[in-house]
Amino acid sequence: MPSFEEPGSHTVDVPIICVITRFGLRSPHLLLPTYLDYRRVANEAKKSATPGLLQALFLVENFTTCYSVSIWEGFEALSFFGTKVRGHVGAARRAFGRVSRDEHNRAEIWSTKWRLESVSNNLSWQDFDLRARVIALSK
């Protein structure tokens, strides 16, 4: 079982994934409504006790670029999110109306999923104990 006491990178074999969605907004005025949609969806996810959702956050790169980041206990948890958090569908539809489009009318929005492969020994993150989750899932 890993302890992560030594400094440096520690390889792990756990199903934890991180979903990152980037929004390229048409105008700085759309940043606040996008953040408010994120808050509504995050609050609904907490209230519905969405299984497998470990942590979520909203990041701002500049006035027209922002990200939602969520950390999950595994890919199967994402299907629960889609069925338990109904507000996500409305928020996603509104987001598509807020983002820029390229010359081919493609929306400037994308999402990626990353599987956790290694961690450092310092996993401090205020109210989220990633160390305990990784150790528990490593058993």
Image (cartoon, rainbow, N blue to C red):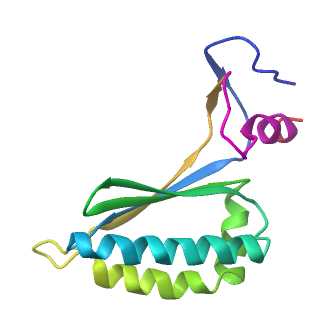
Q: How many marks?
A: 0
Quadrant in which the N terminus is drawn? top right
Q: Is residue 130 left or right of residue 38?
A: right
Q: Quadrant of residue 117?
A: top right
Of residues 24 and 139, the one drawn nearer to the viewer in this rendering = 24
Q: Quadrant of residue 123?
A: top right
Q: Is residue 55 left or right of residue 134?
A: left
Quadrant in which the C terminus is drawn? top right
Coordinates of residue 101 in the picture (x, y in percent): 19, 75
User: Is 99 drawn above or below residue 57 in the view shown?
Assistant: below
User: Is 110 drawn above or below residue 134 in the view shown?
Assistant: below
Q: Is residue 91 magenta?
A: no
Q: What span is in magenta? A: 121-136
User: Is 96 drawn above or below residue 114 in the view shown?
Assistant: below
What residue sits 72% from the left and 45% below the top?
A: 128
User: Is 80 drawn above or below residue 134 in the view shown?
Assistant: below
Q: Quadrant of residue 110?
A: bottom left
Coordinates of residue 103 in the picture (x, y in percent): 9, 74
What residue sits 59% from the left and 85% below the top?
A: 87
Q: Is residue 99 left or right of residue 111?
A: left
Of residues 92 and 75, the one drawn nearer to the viewer in this rendering = 92
Coordinates of residue 65 in the picture (x, y in percent): 29, 60
What residue sits 20% from the left and 73% below the top?
A: 27
Coordinates of residue 70 in the picture (x, y in percent): 58, 57
Q: Outermost residue, top direction?
A: 6
Q: Is residue 46 left or right of residue 87?
A: right
